[in-house]
Image (cartoon, rainbow, N blue to C red):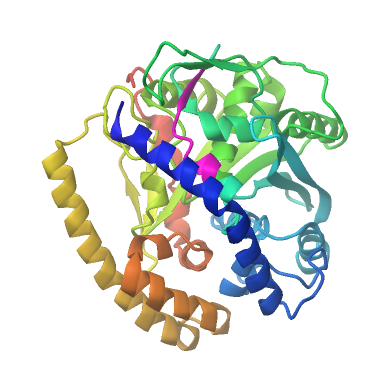
Amino acid sequence: MRWTAFLSIFVEIFLKLIAKPLKKLGSIIENFLNSCTQRDNKDYYSIFGFIDTRFDLDKKIQHGDAKYYPALSMMASKLAYENQAVVQTTISERWKMDFVDFYNFYNEFKQKSTTQAFIFHNENIDEDMIVVAFRGTSLFSAEDWSTDFNYAGVKIEGIPGKTHFGYMLALGLNKYSRDNDNDDYLGNISGTWPKQIEQDPKRPLAYYTLREKLKEMMSRYENAKIIVTGHSFGGALAVLFPAVLALHGEVELLDKLEGIYTYGQPRVGDGHFGHFMKNNVIREHNIKYYRIVYGYDIVPQLPPRDDAAKSFKHFGTALRFNSFYHGKIIEEESNDIPRIVVRLLYTLILAIVARIVAVWQFIRGLFIGYIAGPEFKESWLLLGLRFIIGILFFPRAIDHLFQDYVNSTRIASDDLLENYPANLAKEDSAQGP
């Protein structure tokens, strides 16, 4: 059994123990921040809404700009953490777009609703776009954290390689079995994903519900294109959703899929799955895949890699922004994994560098509102987290928050985004996993 298996099991047990107190703590903190406003009210924000208080789109970024959809998708991914009333009000009143629906999806494995997403429609003279945004990990939800740390790989019949079991369950996988003769906790789980099922209307599954809604919308808006997006766990679902569409031969929807935009996305599958995504999904249907990473964000490095043959890995290049919001295209993750001594040394050096950068980011946060403009001013809550978490404890965690991702998409140069992700389409399609 690999060390990642021990980590996954330990975290699962720990999360079960703290689930209720964590949820209670979240309620106390968010009720305090909201002055006890009703939780389903349009003025009740999650803790993330207080960390980054921006809900308006950047008026300087116009439709047709290269960073319009990256910036819009990031704001939609951020908005996905809020309740339905906040989502609907923001889209309709602030963004002046058409709110379509908000969903709470059922997870058969957990026997409760754990996956959230919403759809909105952006129709204008030049282009007609439907956006699906998945919510990421709720800070005070042990269920979400449990999904993230369910590192088991599942082999779906018809999809090459293995994918993240927890994320597939969140998307709607409900037919699977484990090989009890295998002593590897992360080992042989197999699943089938039927094209059609009879859904319980009280327990909707994410994939089937979204697929049918998009089909219904495409019948009304024939010229519309589709974007799927998400931050963190939501970014993982945004990548896996088109993979299941490809499994089921949903060519019309895939041909309408303009782009996949993910922010701080974790690894979702092994090299064979990545090869399938690049060649049978991204290139085959000319889909733009934007995987955006800020600084030393730890989440894109999860699940950790410890075996080149079995580990999950990212496919395609990524667009990484540094603490000055300068972006750079980074190469696809290698199949090779360095020896453990090299990895430990690299981790130590990275921890030191990340802490130094965290100090700089705290100082930058004090002045950025005066330098870049008032919309970039950082909240007192974010500055406090930059100091406590970023400087004192875990600097790589602070890079996962929204503020820097939103800033990156707003400050990024148009030239950089115009040239990315075209390089993925130009890669040698014969290259193996």
Q: Is residue 414 visible?
A: yes
Quarter placement of the C terminus: top left
Q: Is residue 22 left or right of residue 308?
A: right
Q: Is residue 67 left or right of residue 97?
A: left
Q: Which portion, as a residue range, is magenta?
A: 145-155
Q: Quadrant of residue 333?
A: top left
Q: Is residue 261 left or right of residue 11?
A: right
Residue, x 68% and y 78% (percent of image)? 32
Quarter placement of the N terminus: top left
The answer to if 24 sits in the magenta stretch is no
Residue, x 58% and y 59% (percent of image)? 22
Residue 342 to residue 98: above or below: above
Residue, x 21% and y 33% (percent of image)? 337
Q: Quadrant of residue 97?
A: bottom right
Residue 11 point in image, percent of width and height: 44, 44
Residue 79 to residue 432: above or below: below
Residue 306 to residue 194: above or below: below
Q: Is residue 69 visible?
A: no
Residue 428 point in image, percent of width and height: 34, 24
Residue 151 point in image, percent of width and height: 44, 34
The answer to if 147 sits in the magenta stretch is yes
Give 298 or 360, whichever is nearer the viewer: 298
Residue 70 point in image, percent of width and height: 56, 54
